[in-house]
Amino acid sequence: MRNAFIDELVALATTHDHIALIVGDLGYSVIEPFADRFPDRFINAGVAEQNMTGLAAGMASEGYHVFTYSIANFPTFRCAEQIRNDIDYHQLPVTVVAVGGGLAYGALGYSHHAVQDYALLRSMPNMLIGAPGDPMEVRACMRYLVANPQPSYLRLGKAGEPCFHAEVPQVAPGQWLALPSQGDPAARATLLTTGATLELGMQLAAQPAFADCQVHSLPLWGRGSKAMQVAASAGYDELITLEDHLVDAGFGSWMMEALSPSGRAGIVLQNGLSADVCAQVGTQAALNAAGGLGQVLRRARAA
Protein backbone atom coordinates (compact mmCIF):
# COMPACT_ATOMS: atom_id res chain seq x y z
CA MET A 1 0.00 0.00 0.00
CA ARG A 2 2.86 2.41 0.75
CA ASN A 3 4.24 2.12 -2.75
CA ALA A 4 0.80 2.61 -4.31
CA PHE A 5 0.34 5.70 -2.12
CA ILE A 6 3.56 7.41 -3.13
CA ASP A 7 3.19 6.45 -6.79
CA GLU A 8 -0.32 7.91 -6.88
CA LEU A 9 0.76 11.00 -4.93
CA VAL A 10 3.50 11.72 -7.48
CA ALA A 11 1.06 11.24 -10.36
CA LEU A 12 -1.48 13.57 -8.77
CA ALA A 13 1.13 16.18 -7.83
CA THR A 14 2.24 16.31 -11.47
CA THR A 15 -1.09 17.88 -12.43
CA HIS A 16 -1.94 19.53 -9.09
CA ASP A 17 0.78 21.98 -8.08
CA HIS A 18 -0.84 22.63 -4.70
CA ILE A 19 -0.11 19.12 -3.33
CA ALA A 20 2.59 19.00 -0.65
CA LEU A 21 4.05 16.24 1.53
CA ILE A 22 5.41 16.62 5.06
CA VAL A 23 7.06 13.71 6.86
CA GLY A 24 8.14 13.20 10.44
CA ASP A 25 11.73 12.12 9.71
CA LEU A 26 10.79 8.74 8.27
CA GLY A 27 9.50 7.09 5.15
CA TYR A 28 12.93 6.67 3.62
CA SER A 29 13.02 4.18 0.72
CA VAL A 30 9.34 5.09 0.16
CA ILE A 31 8.95 8.87 -0.15
CA GLU A 32 12.01 9.63 -2.31
CA PRO A 33 10.09 9.67 -5.63
CA PHE A 34 8.05 12.63 -4.37
CA ALA A 35 10.90 14.38 -2.55
CA ASP A 36 13.21 14.15 -5.58
CA ARG A 37 10.57 15.25 -8.09
CA PHE A 38 9.02 18.06 -6.02
CA PRO A 39 11.67 19.28 -3.55
CA ASP A 40 9.92 22.63 -3.14
CA ARG A 41 6.76 20.83 -1.96
CA PHE A 42 8.46 18.36 0.37
CA ILE A 43 9.34 19.08 4.00
CA ASN A 44 10.91 16.87 6.63
CA ALA A 45 9.57 18.32 9.88
CA GLY A 46 11.76 16.08 12.00
CA VAL A 47 10.61 14.05 14.96
CA ALA A 48 8.05 16.71 15.85
CA GLU A 49 4.63 15.51 14.78
CA GLN A 50 2.71 18.28 16.55
CA ASN A 51 4.77 20.86 14.71
CA MET A 52 4.32 18.90 11.48
CA THR A 53 0.54 19.06 11.87
CA GLY A 54 0.47 22.74 12.72
CA LEU A 55 2.69 23.47 9.74
CA ALA A 56 0.37 21.44 7.50
CA ALA A 57 -2.64 23.39 8.73
CA GLY A 58 -0.91 26.69 8.04
CA MET A 59 0.04 25.65 4.52
CA ALA A 60 -3.47 24.34 3.89
CA SER A 61 -4.92 27.69 4.94
CA GLU A 62 -2.83 29.24 2.16
CA GLY A 63 -4.12 26.93 -0.56
CA TYR A 64 -2.11 23.72 -0.33
CA HIS A 65 -3.50 20.21 0.02
CA VAL A 66 -1.01 18.79 2.49
CA PHE A 67 -0.32 15.13 3.19
CA THR A 68 1.38 14.41 6.51
CA TYR A 69 3.05 11.01 6.76
CA SER A 70 4.26 8.94 9.68
CA ILE A 71 4.02 5.53 11.34
CA ALA A 72 0.89 4.28 13.08
CA ASN A 73 0.02 6.42 16.12
CA PHE A 74 2.56 9.18 15.63
CA PRO A 75 0.62 11.43 13.21
CA THR A 76 -2.65 10.83 15.08
CA PHE A 77 -2.53 10.41 18.85
CA ARG A 78 0.69 12.34 19.36
CA CYS A 79 -0.86 15.41 17.71
CA ALA A 80 -4.57 14.86 18.32
CA GLU A 81 -5.07 18.42 19.60
CA GLN A 82 -3.59 19.93 16.45
CA ILE A 83 -5.74 17.68 14.25
CA ARG A 84 -8.84 18.59 16.25
CA ASN A 85 -8.30 22.35 16.59
CA ASP A 86 -6.20 23.29 13.56
CA ILE A 87 -7.40 20.92 10.83
CA ASP A 88 -10.82 19.51 11.60
CA TYR A 89 -12.33 22.60 13.23
CA HIS A 90 -11.24 24.84 10.34
CA GLN A 91 -12.12 22.21 7.73
CA LEU A 92 -8.72 22.43 6.09
CA PRO A 93 -7.52 20.15 3.27
CA VAL A 94 -4.99 18.12 5.20
CA THR A 95 -4.76 14.35 4.77
CA VAL A 96 -3.17 12.63 7.76
CA VAL A 97 -1.47 9.47 6.46
CA ALA A 98 -0.70 6.67 8.89
CA VAL A 99 1.34 3.77 7.59
CA GLY A 100 1.17 0.43 9.40
CA GLY A 101 -2.46 0.49 10.53
CA GLY A 102 -3.65 -2.11 12.99
CA LEU A 103 -0.86 -4.38 14.22
CA ALA A 104 1.45 -4.10 11.21
CA TYR A 105 4.22 -2.89 13.54
CA GLY A 106 3.23 -5.33 16.27
CA ALA A 107 6.82 -6.39 16.94
CA LEU A 108 7.57 -2.84 18.17
CA GLY A 109 4.98 -2.99 20.93
CA TYR A 110 2.01 -0.97 22.14
CA SER A 111 3.48 2.40 21.15
CA HIS A 112 3.15 1.26 17.52
CA HIS A 113 -0.21 -0.54 17.79
CA ALA A 114 -2.67 1.53 15.75
CA VAL A 115 -5.77 -0.09 17.22
CA GLN A 116 -7.64 2.96 18.56
CA ASP A 117 -7.21 5.33 15.63
CA TYR A 118 -10.68 4.84 14.15
CA ALA A 119 -12.16 5.69 17.55
CA LEU A 120 -10.19 8.92 17.73
CA LEU A 121 -10.62 10.16 14.17
CA ARG A 122 -14.27 9.24 13.66
CA SER A 123 -15.22 11.38 16.65
CA MET A 124 -14.10 14.51 14.80
CA PRO A 125 -17.12 15.95 12.99
CA ASN A 126 -15.45 16.91 9.69
CA MET A 127 -12.99 14.05 9.32
CA LEU A 128 -13.30 11.54 6.48
CA ILE A 129 -11.62 8.19 7.08
CA GLY A 130 -9.92 6.46 4.17
CA ALA A 131 -9.17 2.82 4.94
CA PRO A 132 -8.33 1.11 1.64
CA GLY A 133 -8.28 -2.67 1.49
CA ASP A 134 -5.75 -3.14 -1.29
CA PRO A 135 -3.38 -1.06 -3.46
CA MET A 136 -6.14 -0.34 -6.00
CA GLU A 137 -8.33 1.10 -3.25
CA VAL A 138 -5.37 3.22 -2.11
CA ARG A 139 -5.26 4.82 -5.55
CA ALA A 140 -9.04 5.24 -5.56
CA CYS A 141 -9.03 6.94 -2.15
CA MET A 142 -6.19 9.24 -3.18
CA ARG A 143 -8.05 10.34 -6.31
CA TYR A 144 -11.22 11.02 -4.35
CA LEU A 145 -9.42 12.99 -1.62
CA VAL A 146 -7.57 15.20 -4.09
CA ALA A 147 -10.77 15.83 -6.05
CA ASN A 148 -12.66 16.54 -2.81
CA PRO A 149 -10.17 18.24 -0.45
CA GLN A 150 -11.20 18.15 3.20
CA PRO A 151 -9.91 17.02 6.59
CA SER A 152 -9.12 13.36 6.07
CA TYR A 153 -7.29 10.37 7.49
CA LEU A 154 -5.69 7.79 5.21
CA ARG A 155 -4.85 4.54 6.97
CA LEU A 156 -2.43 2.32 5.07
CA GLY A 157 -1.11 -1.15 5.59
CA LYS A 158 2.63 -1.67 5.71
CA ALA A 159 3.63 -3.62 2.60
CA GLY A 160 2.85 -6.68 0.53
CA GLU A 161 -0.94 -6.47 0.57
CA PRO A 162 -2.49 -8.37 -2.38
CA CYS A 163 -4.73 -6.75 -5.00
CA PHE A 164 -8.36 -7.85 -5.14
CA HIS A 165 -9.57 -5.32 -7.70
CA ALA A 166 -8.59 -5.74 -11.34
CA GLU A 167 -8.62 -1.96 -11.80
CA VAL A 168 -8.97 1.18 -9.73
CA PRO A 169 -12.58 1.32 -8.51
CA GLN A 170 -14.77 4.38 -8.15
CA VAL A 171 -15.18 5.24 -4.47
CA ALA A 172 -17.27 7.68 -2.46
CA PRO A 173 -17.94 8.12 1.26
CA GLY A 174 -20.31 5.48 2.62
CA GLN A 175 -20.36 3.52 -0.64
CA TRP A 176 -19.85 -0.25 -0.40
CA LEU A 177 -17.65 -1.95 -2.97
CA ALA A 178 -18.65 -5.49 -3.98
CA LEU A 179 -15.77 -7.96 -4.28
CA PRO A 180 -15.79 -11.11 -6.40
CA SER A 181 -16.28 -14.09 -4.10
CA GLN A 182 -17.57 -17.64 -4.16
CA GLY A 183 -20.59 -16.62 -2.13
CA ASP A 184 -24.16 -16.66 -3.39
CA PRO A 185 -24.79 -13.30 -5.13
CA ALA A 186 -28.34 -13.42 -3.76
CA ALA A 187 -27.10 -14.03 -0.20
CA ARG A 188 -28.62 -12.02 2.60
CA ALA A 189 -25.35 -12.02 4.57
CA THR A 190 -22.12 -10.16 3.83
CA LEU A 191 -18.64 -9.71 5.20
CA LEU A 192 -18.12 -5.94 5.29
CA THR A 193 -14.49 -4.96 5.68
CA THR A 194 -12.57 -1.72 5.98
CA GLY A 195 -8.83 -1.39 5.61
CA ALA A 196 -6.42 -4.29 5.30
CA THR A 197 -8.94 -6.81 6.66
CA LEU A 198 -10.25 -7.09 3.11
CA GLU A 199 -7.76 -9.94 2.71
CA LEU A 200 -9.28 -11.71 5.73
CA GLY A 201 -12.77 -11.21 4.32
CA MET A 202 -11.77 -12.88 1.07
CA GLN A 203 -10.17 -15.77 2.96
CA LEU A 204 -13.27 -16.29 5.10
CA ALA A 205 -15.57 -16.15 2.09
CA ALA A 206 -13.72 -19.14 0.62
CA GLN A 207 -14.59 -21.28 3.67
CA PRO A 208 -17.72 -23.46 3.71
CA ALA A 209 -19.02 -21.73 6.85
CA PHE A 210 -19.28 -18.46 4.90
CA ALA A 211 -20.51 -19.84 1.59
CA ASP A 212 -23.72 -17.84 2.03
CA CYS A 213 -21.80 -14.55 2.40
CA GLN A 214 -20.88 -11.89 -0.09
CA VAL A 215 -17.83 -9.67 0.49
CA HIS A 216 -17.89 -5.87 0.50
CA SER A 217 -15.26 -3.25 1.27
CA LEU A 218 -15.99 0.22 2.66
CA PRO A 219 -12.84 2.29 2.06
CA LEU A 220 -14.30 5.76 2.76
CA TRP A 221 -16.48 6.43 5.78
CA GLY A 222 -17.05 8.77 8.69
CA ARG A 223 -19.65 10.75 10.55
CA GLY A 224 -21.01 12.32 7.40
CA SER A 225 -21.87 9.01 5.70
CA LYS A 226 -23.71 7.32 8.55
CA ALA A 227 -27.14 8.11 7.15
CA MET A 228 -26.36 6.18 3.95
CA GLN A 229 -25.84 2.88 5.72
CA VAL A 230 -29.51 2.04 6.26
CA ALA A 231 -30.13 1.91 2.51
CA ALA A 232 -26.78 0.21 1.82
CA SER A 233 -27.57 -2.61 4.25
CA ALA A 234 -31.24 -3.01 3.30
CA GLY A 235 -30.73 -6.26 1.41
CA TYR A 236 -28.99 -8.06 4.28
CA ASP A 237 -30.13 -9.86 7.40
CA GLU A 238 -26.59 -10.41 8.66
CA LEU A 239 -23.74 -7.94 8.42
CA ILE A 240 -20.35 -9.16 9.66
CA THR A 241 -17.91 -6.26 10.08
CA LEU A 242 -14.17 -6.95 10.00
CA GLU A 243 -11.53 -4.51 11.27
CA ASP A 244 -7.98 -4.63 12.67
CA HIS A 245 -8.93 -2.20 15.44
CA LEU A 246 -10.22 -2.72 18.95
CA VAL A 247 -13.83 -3.83 18.72
CA ASP A 248 -14.76 -0.93 21.02
CA ALA A 249 -15.57 2.34 19.23
CA GLY A 250 -14.29 1.19 15.86
CA PHE A 251 -15.83 0.46 12.48
CA GLY A 252 -18.37 -2.11 13.69
CA SER A 253 -19.51 0.26 16.43
CA TRP A 254 -19.85 3.03 13.84
CA MET A 255 -22.05 0.76 11.72
CA MET A 256 -24.25 -0.18 14.69
CA GLU A 257 -24.68 3.51 15.50
CA ALA A 258 -25.58 4.19 11.87
CA LEU A 259 -28.26 1.48 11.83
CA SER A 260 -29.61 2.04 15.33
CA PRO A 261 -32.21 4.73 14.48
CA SER A 262 -33.79 2.35 11.98
CA GLY A 263 -33.87 -0.51 14.47
CA ARG A 264 -31.43 -2.56 12.37
CA ALA A 265 -28.36 -2.42 14.60
CA GLY A 266 -29.04 -6.02 15.61
CA ILE A 267 -28.02 -7.34 12.18
CA VAL A 268 -24.39 -6.34 12.83
CA LEU A 269 -21.92 -8.96 14.04
CA GLN A 270 -18.65 -7.26 14.98
CA ASN A 271 -15.29 -8.91 14.54
CA GLY A 272 -12.32 -6.89 15.64
CA LEU A 273 -9.54 -7.08 18.20
CA SER A 274 -9.84 -7.66 21.93
CA ALA A 275 -7.92 -5.42 24.31
CA ASP A 276 -5.63 -8.39 25.10
CA VAL A 277 -3.36 -7.35 22.25
CA CYS A 278 -2.50 -4.06 23.95
CA ALA A 279 -0.11 -5.80 26.36
CA GLN A 280 1.52 -8.08 23.78
CA VAL A 281 4.40 -7.89 21.33
CA GLY A 282 4.59 -10.10 18.26
CA THR A 283 4.10 -10.40 14.56
CA GLN A 284 1.00 -8.95 12.96
CA ALA A 285 -0.40 -12.41 12.25
CA ALA A 286 0.23 -13.64 15.79
CA LEU A 287 -1.32 -10.59 17.41
CA ASN A 288 -4.33 -10.63 15.10
CA ALA A 289 -4.93 -14.24 16.11
CA ALA A 290 -4.41 -13.46 19.80
CA GLY A 291 -6.90 -10.61 19.52
CA GLY A 292 -9.56 -12.84 18.00
CA LEU A 293 -9.52 -11.35 14.52
CA GLY A 294 -11.03 -13.87 12.14
CA GLN A 295 -12.73 -15.89 14.85
CA VAL A 296 -16.21 -15.05 13.62
CA LEU A 297 -19.22 -16.59 15.30
CA ARG A 298 -22.32 -16.75 13.13
CA ARG A 299 -25.87 -16.59 14.43
CA ALA A 300 -27.62 -19.92 14.89
CA ARG A 301 -29.87 -20.60 11.91
CA ALA A 302 -33.33 -22.05 12.20
CA ALA A 303 -33.56 -25.54 10.70
Image (tube, rainbow, N blue to C red):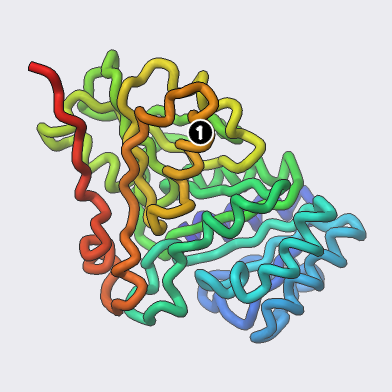
- Residue 64 in the image: state x and y as whole percent: 83, 58
Residue at 42%, 47% (x, y): give it. 134
- Say which residue label 1 marks: 169
Q: Secondary structure at mark 1?
A: loop
Image position of 153 (left or right of 126): left
Residue at 78%, 59% (x, y): give it. 87
Q: Residue furthest bottom?
A: 47
Residue at 71%, 71% (x, y): give it. 22
Placement of 301 over or under 152, stated as above or below: above
Q: Quadrant of residue 53?
A: bottom right
Residue at 35%, 28% (x, y): give it. 267
Depth check: give the residue in front, 283 or 236.
236
- Residue 292 in the image: state x and y as whole percent: 24, 57
Whether residue 178 is visible, yes or no, is yes
Depth check: give the residue in front, 292 or 191.
292
Q: Quadrant of residue 88?
A: bottom right
